[in-house]
Amino acid sequence: MQLTQSFHKAALEQPDAYATVFRQRKTTFAQFVERVSRVAGALHALDVAHGDRIGILALNSDRYLEYVFGTLWAGAVVNPVNTRWSVSEIAYSLNDCGTAILFIDETFAHLAQPLRERCPVLRHVIWCGEGVPPAGMHGDDYEGWLGRATPAADAQRSGNDLAAILYTGGTTGVPKGVMLSHANLVSNALCALAAASRPVVQAVLHTAPLFHIGAMALVFQAALRGAKHVVLGGFDPGTVIETIAAEHVNETFVVPTMIKAMLDHPGFATHKLSSLTSVLYGAAPIDSTLLQRALGKLPASQFVQLYGMTEIAPVAAVLPAHCHTPDSQKLKSAGRPAPICEIRIVDPASGEPLPTGQVGEVAVRGPSVMMGYWNKPEETAKALRNGWMHTGDGGYMDEDGYLFITDRIKDMIISGGENVYSTEVENALLAHPAVEACAVIGIPDEKWGEAVHAVIVLRAGHQLTLEEIRDHCRQLIAGYKCPRSVAFRAELPLSAAGKLLKYKLREALVNNPAPAPNTPA
């Protein structure tokens, strides 16, 4: 169970085959291993020891992959930074796990100095962008920095050695660092590959942001199969379509909103996409109407849904291709538990298993379940009980063993494939002096799947507009977490025990699906 092993194999078995493609740069497996060993050597020269955390704040690129495997080669731990976070959120994650070295590219170079000021743990900033870096970063350019490094031997970290700390939003209002071992990530990659039969793959496209566990998981799955990694800086439907055709891409991971954007793009019909045999998607079930369109326009492609979370590295259940027909009774399910992964539905309070068909909390057990949350023993103890990861998702299992997700017990909102935790947004809103009380829920959105909706009780004598609320929130949390709509109330619905009843807010929106954003509801 060693994440670097796949590239040792590929360098021996197909040294001249392409390992990475990014823009005009193409690197063979032999070259990639050499470059990765130099990244590790350069990190050793900065006194990086086994287990040290190395971060990256950058868009997708071939150098991002070199960072991942170079860090692992050095025996260190990857800490990819969510590029959509605010400076405060980024600084928290770096300080929390003691990330001393940060790779950064030209898109985020302007954040280097603010992060230095907020992160006393940050010792070195390494340039991984194009051209000459700003002052204060290592190397006159990335290639020069890499070329001067002495190649290092693979540290051969494996098994229960820590490989990654991936930060995910939390109900406490601050991110939590999910600790994943080499064994967690390798076993999950193998598990996901075994869960649903896929055609032979030669080229995989990475367009989802690599700081996401779903995108990172595809990197490890593709590496195990010796596939070529075709990398895009981000998602643009036209570029994705062109790249699939040009590089004969066989497989990619997206969210349903990305699929719709591709099908709607005017350039879709002008490119041959018959090489694309597998479309993996996650974050939400696919709408039957969208699936019917996709099947019609991508007849060579099979669709596979992956359900999971960062804490499970990430795949727990898989909905295979044969369930992806518009009239399938299982299309709205998250699929069946993946091999060597157990799923059961439990009572959220007692943890006791519930009968088939009864809604409860989804719990998962298996070798890919995380080691715990970094420096958060109480949060870890709440999530990991008797070997089971309590996901916070509500759902049920049907008589055929398919998992259906009904609600998010932790009130997580999924907007455009991004996880937004309502408590985090509520904490930001409550920091405004005009806000007396608030509640945040997800509402259906045609483009994003769900949108963040705030219900606010104002303090006496105060007024707020949606734009004022968004401007305030942007100072504390990422832009995609900020409310897209708001309703003002005199009071929030509470139970006799004083508990906020969010379901009543959702019921109100069913009866009035288009609330005026800046007027009392």
Image (spheres, rainbow, N blue to C red):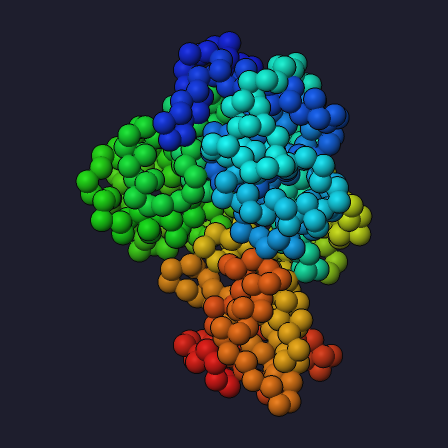
Residue plotted at (60% across, 73% down):
439
Furthest-right residue in view?
377
Residue plotted at (24% across, 44% down):
268
- Residue 202 or residue 61, whichever sits in front: 61
Image: 467 above or below 290: below
Residue plotted at (70% across, 50% down):
118
Image: 465 above or below 36: below
Image: 462 above or below 348: below
Q: Locate residue 26 relative to residue 464 in the image: left or right.
A: left
Residue 203 in the image: state x and y as whole percent. 38, 27
* Residue 482 visible at all: yes
- Residue 349 or residue 180, whichever sits in front: 180
Furthest-front residue in view?
135
Residue 487 in the image: state x and y as whole percent. 51, 79
* Residue 3 visible at all: no
Marker count (numbered): 0
Residue 212 in the image: state x and y as whole percent. 54, 43
Q: Locate residue 127 relative to residue 131 in the image: left or right.
A: right
Furthest-left residue in view?
270
Image: 415 above or below 512: above
Residue plotted at (50% across, 32% down):
132
Res 1 → quadrant: top right
Residue 508 in the image: state x and y as whole percent. 50, 79
Furthest-top residue in view?
12
